[in-house]
Image (cartoon, helix red, strand yellow):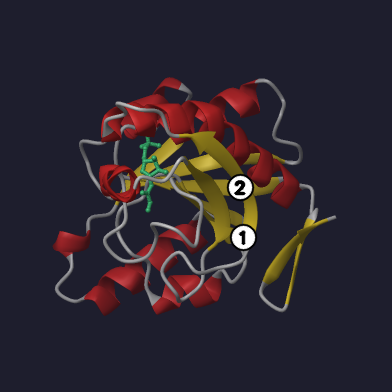
Amino acid sequence: MKNIVVLVSGGGTNLQALIDAQNSNLIKNGRITCVISGNPNAYALERAKNNNIDTEVIRRNDFESFGEYDLALTNLIKSKNADLVVLAGFMTILGHKVISAYENRIINIHPALIPSFCGEGFYGLHVHEAALKKGVKLSGATVHFVNEECDGGPIIMQKAVEVKNGDTPEILQKRIMEQAEWIILPKAVSLFCEDKIQVIDNIAIIK
Ligand code: GAR
């Protein structure tokens, strides 16, 4: 059984999708053992507590340098014996120490079809604002491994979602969450825990 540590910053609807999948036995060979928040007021922490999942808070601003923060976060994740780290709406960029300690063992959900609308500055509603500004007719979500390039790691799973006339960033965000994020994130986590994802030459293959 693999230990899954989930990193959050906000509402935690993706965390909830993982908890629901776990409660329905849809996450094979893994269980969420800890939720770490970058924000002490994140509603995601309540979701974890309601499900008797251990919680921790670590704030970037409590550290003088990014390097100290990176080390502390790495040590915190290690102390939880994580086999898999899931970024479920985690809004702080990860540093070299944590990324290298967990190579191809950190999964992120991004609310667009990478390589569109991704990279630095593309997070949360900003992603949907950019998609609407461009006028794309399809957007969606991507689950990928995290490497040193922001949103550039091996792509595990993607799902497209229609953009409709009159969409606001909020409406599009909700549709992408419901039709893509909450479906593909638990699936990818389960595949990882079942050892069904292989990375060869920076390409993720589902066995
Ligand atoms: C989700 O849409 C997630 O894809 C996005 O933030 C939202 C968090 O919602 N993540 C990013 O933009 C990361 N670059 P949640 O807290 O309700 O899961």
Q: Is residue 201 above or below residue 190?
A: below
Q: Residue at x 29, y 26 (%)?
A: 166
**Quick check: can you spot residue 101?**
yes
Name the side, left or right, on which 173 lies relative to 143.
left
Q: Crowdedness of circle 2 by 10 Å Cα count: few (<14), some, many (20+)?
A: many
Q: Quadrant of the N terminus?
A: top right
Q: Secondary structure at mark 1?
A: strand
The amino acid type found where label 2 is placed reads: Gln
Numbered tag placed on residue 155 in the rendering: 1
Q: Are marks 1 and 2 in contact (CB under 8 Å)?
A: yes
The amino acid type found where label 1 is placed reads: Ile
Where does the image place residue 162, in percent across and percent down from the top left?
Answer: 50, 33
Q: Residue at x 31, y 45 (%)?
A: 124
Name the side, left or right, on which 114 lies relative to 186.
left
Where does the image place residue 118, in percent across and percent down from the top left?
Answer: 39, 60
Alpha carbon separation for disc pair 1 and 2: 8 Å
Q: Residue at x 22, y 61 (%)?
A: 60
Residue 129 location, quadrant: top left
Q: Crowdedness of circle 1 by 10 Å Cα count: few (<14), some, many (20+)?
A: many
Identify the residue position indicated by label 2 in the image.
158
Q: Quadrant of the C terminus?
A: bottom right
Residue 11 location, quadrant: top left
Extreme right residue here? Answer: 207
Q: Nearer the viewer, residue 140 or 38?
A: 140
Q: Secondary structure at mark 2?
A: strand
Residue 145 location, quadrant: bottom right
Name the side, left or right, on which 22 lies relative to 163.
right
